[in-house]
Image (cartoon, rainbow, N blue to C red):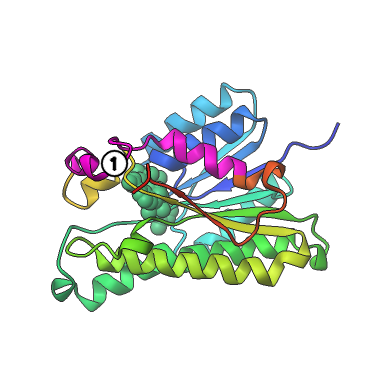
Amino acid sequence: MANPKVVVITGGSRGIGAETAKLFAQHGYNVCLNYVANDTAAERVRSDILNLGVRCIAVKADVSEANDVAKLFSRVDQELGTLTVLVNNAAILNTQARMMDISVERFNDVLQKNVISCFLCCKEAVRRMSTHQGGIGGSIVNVSSMAAKSGSPNEYVDYAASKGAVDTLTRGLALEVAAEGIRVNAVRPGLIYTEMHALGGEPERVDRLKSRIPMQRGGQPSEVADAIFWLASDKSSFATGTMVDLAGGL
Ligand code: NAP
């Protein structure tokens, strides 16, 4: 029997990442779920995944730091085996503010946490997956946001700009590695019920804005996880460099 596939999900301890980690486990993947602070949440997801009968490691690492990222992927090599899928999901959001009130330090921090993290993890994954470097190919899914298209005026232009960069990185990398057995795609969620909105200072944000959504409701993390899984799997085998919008028509 073939070895189980291996997925790394950054920010896999809560919200969209946690649902995605559990979905891959349900499909028999061995899972590395990464997180940065909340040990309890990570351990809860790991325990749920172990109950599904696959292997799972929860690795605390700041994916915006190159040394942490290198250690994260080494643990995957040693403890889970050949990497097949990377989901770049970890990201941060700061409190709502007009752009004129956003400091240079805050903007740089958002770019580091949301873009450099994706760049660093993609590099580690491509080194392992590329058929030009002895790998067996693989799939990368980046979690962008509809904010990349809206610009998030009066809320967080810095976050929106970081997601615009993720879209561009997705497209560029997809074309660079398309002939090396690696597909790179992205999802752009709209308003999804997770704890992230509390970071922006408004836990009830999805409910406040849901009347603007053509489908008249917010999305569930599982609805994003389903699209991530599809993009990662062979079911989307001819898709690369694409963005799937998941926003109820918004
Ligand atoms: P969330 O509930 O706030 O969870 C964020 C996860 O990322 C947590 O597991 C957190 O770990 C981890 N994390 C944050 N910074 C990290 C770092 N530097 N290194 C490693 N892990 C880190 O977020 P979410 O709402 O599920 O969002 C997931 C993704 O979807 C993000 O890329 C977000 O931008 C995108 N998105 C979300 C929405 C939405 O409405 N929720 C909409 C569009 C796009 P700890 O638990 O340890 O803090």
Residue shown at 13%/72% (left/top)?
101
Can residue 180 be spotted in the picture?
yes
Quarter of the image where the N terminus is located: top right
Q: How many marks?
A: 1
Q: What residue span does the magenta drawing correspond to?
A: 203-230
Q: Nearer the viewer, residue 241 or 37?
A: 241
Query: Magenta span has 157?
Result: no
In this view, 90 is above or below 23: below
Residue at the farthest front position: 214
Q: Nearer the viewer, residue 127 or 87?
A: 87
Q: Main secondary structure of the magenta part?
A: helix
For the residue carrying disc 1, how many other residues have a C-alpha within 10 Å: few (<14), some (14-19), or many (20+)? some
Residue shown at 58%/48% (left/top)?
8
Residue at the farthest bottom position: 104
Q: Residue 223: x and y, percent?
A: 45, 36
> Which image quadrant for residue 91?
bottom left
Q: Disc 1 marks which residue?
A: 195
Q: Residue 27: x and y, percent?
A: 65, 30
- Secondary structure beneath disc 1? loop
In this view, 70 is above or below 196: below
**Label 1 residue near ligand 1, CB within 8 Å:** yes
Q: Residue 40: x and y, percent?
A: 37, 34
Q: Nearer the viewer, residue 80 or 197?
A: 197
> Which image quadrant for residue 163?
bottom left
187 sits left or right of 31 in the view: left
160 sits left or right of 76 in the view: left
Q: Residue 80: x and y, percent?
A: 68, 42
**Amino acid residing under circle 1:** Glu
Can residue 37 be spotted in the picture?
no
Query: Magenta span has 206?
Result: yes
Residue shown at 61%/69% (left/top)?
173
In this view, 184 is above or below 119: above
